[in-house]
Image (spheres, helix red, strand yellow):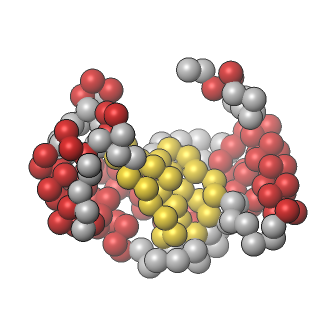
Amino acid sequence: MPYGCFSWYAGYDPADFATAYSHVASIFKTTDPNFKIALVGDAGLQAGWPNNGFSQAMPSADLIGMDVYDFSSQSPSQLQASLNFLEANAVANNKGVVVGEWGLATPAVGGNGDDPAFISTMYNWMGSLTPGAGPGQLLVASYFNNGPNALPQFPSSNTLFSQDFGQTGT
């Protein structure tokens, strides 16, 4: 589905996106000054940095993050570089970290399928961050356990996920 069909879509202009994002953030902050605003991109976040809309909208956010999926187009070293980039920018910009969605993906949608190494990478990286909402701290991470990302269809990864995180995908 093209993003243009969503009423909130600001187009491909980074300045338009930053302006729209900042406007919405100010509405929430005016309503409740304690409301935390998260700005979440994808694992290709560093592409075009610092001139993309994400970096321009960052001053309005309290937390920055990314959605991370195990797609075959991304090597393990690219994944690690994206995670390190997120953490470094959170620290440099005094922002907390969120992983809005993360998960495996089936080959049918371009994923690597049952990939315990991906689970390990995510577990180790998230475990290296201090819990909290301060600069470079991890506030929330959510495994997207649905459809082509559902853990039960990845037996080796599901077992490792259970060992690492203390729960299984059901």
Quadrant of the rendered image containing residue 105: top left
Asked whether, in this view, residue 17 is left or right of residue 99, the answer is: right
**Percent x, y for residue 161?**
22, 58
**Percent x, y for residue 89?**
56, 63
**Percent x, y for residue 29?**
81, 63
Quadrant of the rendered image containing residue 64: bottom right
Q: Quadrant of the N terminus?
A: top right
**Percent x, y for residue 24?**
80, 49
Asked whether, in this view, residue 51 is left or right of residue 84, the answer is: right
Quadrant of the rendered image containing residue 71: top left
Against 42, is 73 above or below?
Answer: above
Q: How many marks?
A: 0
**Residue under the point 35% across and 46% down:** 145
Against 145, is 84 above or below?
Answer: below
Residue projecting furthest to the left: 156
Against 4, is 80 above or below?
Answer: below
**Residue under the point 62% across and 69% down:** 95
Asked whether, in this view, residue 119 is left or right of residue 89, the answer is: left
**Residue under the point 26% across and 51% down:** 169
- Of 20 and 87, nearer the camera is 20
Residue projecting furthest to the front: 170
**Residue under the point 73% across and 51% down:** 57
- Of 168 and 13, nearer the camera is 168
Asked whether, in this view, residue 70 is left or right of residue 134, the answer is: left
- Of 141 and 57, nearer the camera is 141
Residue 120 visible? The answer is: no
Residue 142 visible? The answer is: yes
